Amino acid sequence: MKLVLSALILLWNTNPGALAQSSGTSLVRPDTEAAFVYRPQDTLFWSEVENGMRDKNYTYVIKIGNQKARDSKGDSLDQAEGRLAMAGVMKQLGLNFGATEMYRELAKTKPGTQVAFQALTEIERIIKTFPSDFESLTGDLILDQDVDNWPKHLTDFTAYVNAEFNRLSGYDQWADAEYKKITPESYWDFKVKYNLALADVAAGRIDSAIERFSSISSNQAAPATLRTEATHQYARLVFEKGDFVQSNKILKGVDLGARERGLVLLERAWAKYYLKDYSRSLGLLAALDAPIFEPARSGEASVLKMLIYKELCYYDAVADVAKDFNKRFAKSMEAIRKRRDLRQDQGIVHLSVLDPRILVHVDFLNQLKEERRIWSREGLDKNEALAGFTKRYDFKIRELNEILNWKLLKKTREVGDLVLDWADQVSFLDYQSRVDGLRIQRITEDGYKSEEVPHMTFDRVYWTFTNEYWLDELDSLKVLVSSQCKAGGTGAPKGAR
């Protein structure tokens, strides 16, 4: 089994943040985070903003925010407060890119004020929750500023950014000094631990990586998304160590999105195969045929099915899987052989996106497109106060499309090579099973047998699978298959149940 362990990528998601609370406009005292309370520059204005937010009258809040910004003298804090209100509306509507753009401007133009700190707080919350352009959001906001007097929750964030920059630049001592500033068991502390575990994997320090991933996975204080990612990586490394029972047990607790969940099902199927639980392995592979997992279906599933059927001497079933594989990948194989642009092949693109280095850009692009639709639906593209942000959305979408186009140029070629490799394995297994079918194979008294369906007891009910997929039942699917080698090989096993 080819397990692609995540590269050193920083994926940004977990706990959602709330809309901006009160934040002041004076310099923040460095003593405690309690000093960070928003005291509006204009209490009457901010009261109107809060009422508008509560009533979901977002158009009105944008209107008074823009009026406040226009009527204020010069580049004042009153003007910044107006724009802070407008950014809050965007965040409330789920327009996270637009909100971060405005918050970023406020943080840069009003450094050292609570308006800036409120903006940075919201940026941090969005980064922890949604896909975003982390480098552009944090680079000139944090790396070039004096953060000694920032509130504690922001110094954790800034220490993390500085530490990662130093570590990736090769300045390990400087990075360690920044890591020590981060509050233990905070979000950014767990993020550091996760990244260090990935670094261990890249350096071949597998035992250290297992220990780090395991500690995150078992810690309920860790953010849910990071804990899930760590659990997945932990299970993969345990699999590579040969502990298939433990790996399968860990993988059962991994709850990812549909695309990643398909990978988990395949990994569990491999674990069950090595444990010689062929019925369960084939059941998990049958679950992969659910339409929701279409983007995650790879030729590896076909290879595994053929290995199991060949081992149990179901030679006709081996041939059927080979035919299904050739049909499924026919267009891709033709595109590869004719040296076409593989970025135009949807199947190969789907497989390419399984690489987390590609997926992070795809997730961000999909979010931007959805936000752009919300932007138009709410009529913000016609709002003069936000005209510049419409252009920013369109520009960012074009930029991400170009980045993905460039990255997929190389990745789709790699996946094309992988498809050819699967095709060679499928062809070899098909040929070998045809040869094996012409002779008596492995006549043994202790061949593999699946469980028998009882007809006199009712402690368990069996239902024949009819191609209707329910997510909560996928783990229960089995293919009741027993070794047919003693009989010299036969056709197809019973269906999934």
Image: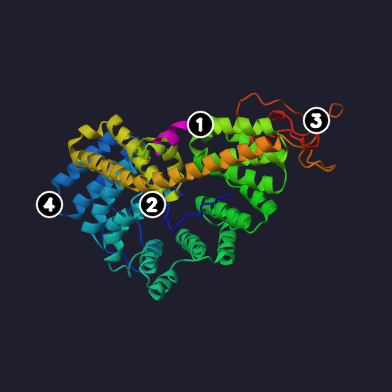
Q: Mark 1 highlights which residue? A: 328
Residue 127: mark in rendering: 2
Q: Earlier in the sequence, mark 2 or mark 3?
A: 2
Q: Which of marks 4 and 2 is in front?
A: 2
Residue interval drawn in magenta: 328-336
Q: Closer to the camera: disc 2 or disc 3?
A: 3
Query: Among all residues in the image, which is located at the extreme right?
Result: 456
Q: What element carries label 2?
A: helix
In front: label 1 or label 4: 1
Residue 16 showing in the rendered view: yes
Look at label 1 and name its amino acid.
Answer: Arg
The residue carrying mark 3 is: 453
Q: Is residue 331 magenta?
A: yes
Measuring from the top left, give residue 454's x and y in whole percent: 83, 30
Q: Mark 4 points at which residue?
A: 73
| Contact flag, marks 1 and 4 (Cβ < 8 Å) | no
Q: Upstream in the sequence, badge 3 or badge 1?
A: 1
Give the mark, 4 or 3, whose residue is nearer the N terminus.
Answer: 4
Q: In which quarter of the image is residue 57?
A: top left
Q: Is residue 13 left or right of residue 290?
A: left
Sequence order check, earlier mark of 1 and 2: 2
